[in-house]
Amino acid sequence: MPPCSATRPACTWRGTGTQRSTHILPRALQCGRRGRGPVMAQSSKIEWTQATWNPITGCTKVSPGCAHCYAETMAERWRGISGHPFEYGFDLQLRPNRLKLPLLWKRPKLIFVNSMSDLFHENVPDAFVVKVFETMREASWHTFQVLTKRTERARDLTRKLAELDPWPDNVWMGTSIENQRWVQRADSLREIPAKIRFISCEPLLGPLRLNLHGIHWVICGGESGARARRMDPSWVRDLRDQCVAAGVPFFFKQWGAFDENGRRVGKKRAGRILDGQIFDEMPRLV
């Protein structure tokens, strides 16, 4: 096993009791299989972004939206495969050799930060988060989309960051809210001085009443995969109507495994048309 990089205790995988720790990967594995070139996601199939950047991978579950995590499913396929970037599955891993990758992408992109993790996970050292922000500030021609379920830590840590430098204009900050139980995440998000603050309601697991004051974008989507939970169309329409009333751009990403009529047809066939329209509204780029 590689050495543990965090000073905090190892994480516990909620619901199983399995211990998961934070690792810094050996240099040969940080950028690709057996060091054969960097893992650079210069394009992405995620509808609301253009590329992904993962200086951290792995996470632990904090709420029901995490139950069927696509990133965990993908990473765990490779657990135990010697030399593979996910040899340690979905254990939290710091990947320092990926920190500067966005600087190599010369054309401006929308970049989703840590699609395979959470930048503000409690076992990611403050100093490493600072390094990620340094890269985002330096790569000013890109727009970075940071998404977290840990908004309280994000708020507290970004207050410290603000003492060093203002929040970068090219960094959007978002949180995931899957049902009414977790709407308080938006309260912490509003305290973060990002020019664009957004909410991702994916997977949407129940009806939501959102306070959209200080929120600049809402993403909505249903769950996909073999164990997907069905999203009620009334939840989607109500969320869309809230956004229209508040003047907030609304992006409908997908129905997920179930179509609008509740039939399990798979993500591709279910599509992303809502009431005869594709909603792909975006906030104004900064």
Image: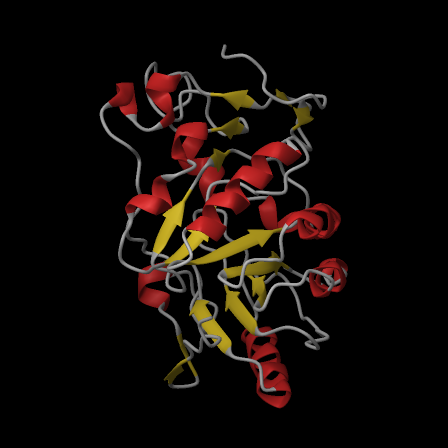
Q: Position of residue 177 (x, y in %)?
A: 64, 60
- Quadrant location of residue 39? top left
Residue located farthest toward the left when viewing the structure as drawn: 36
Q: How many marks?
A: 0
Q: Which of 110 and 66 lies nearest the eye of the viewer?
A: 110
Residue 12 visible in this rendered orientation of the protein: yes
Image position of 260 with respect to 169: above or below: below
Q: Which of 239 and 108 lies nearest the eye of the viewer?
A: 108
Q: Looking at the image, what colour scheme do you see? A: secondary structure
For the point 71% across and 77% down, the residue is 213
Q: Position of residue 105 (x, y in %)?
A: 29, 49
- Quadrant location of residue 184? bottom right
Q: Position of residue 253 (x, y in %)?
A: 43, 67
Q: Is residue 22 left or right of residue 267?
A: right
Image position of 100 with respect to 111: above or below: above
Q: Which of 282 and 108 lies nearest the eye of the viewer?
A: 108
For the point 66% across and 47% down, the residue is 164
Image position of 140 with respect to 15: above or below: below
Residue located farthest toward the bottom when viewing the structure as drawn: 245
Residue 69 visible in this rendered orientation of the protein: no
Q: Position of residue 69 (x, y in %)?
A: 51, 44
For the point 64% across and 86% down, the residue is 246
Q: Which of 101 and 237 lies nearest the eye of the viewer?
A: 101
Q: Is residue 228 left or right of residue 62?
A: left
For the point 68% across and 50% down, the residue is 158
- Quadrant location of residue 282? bottom left
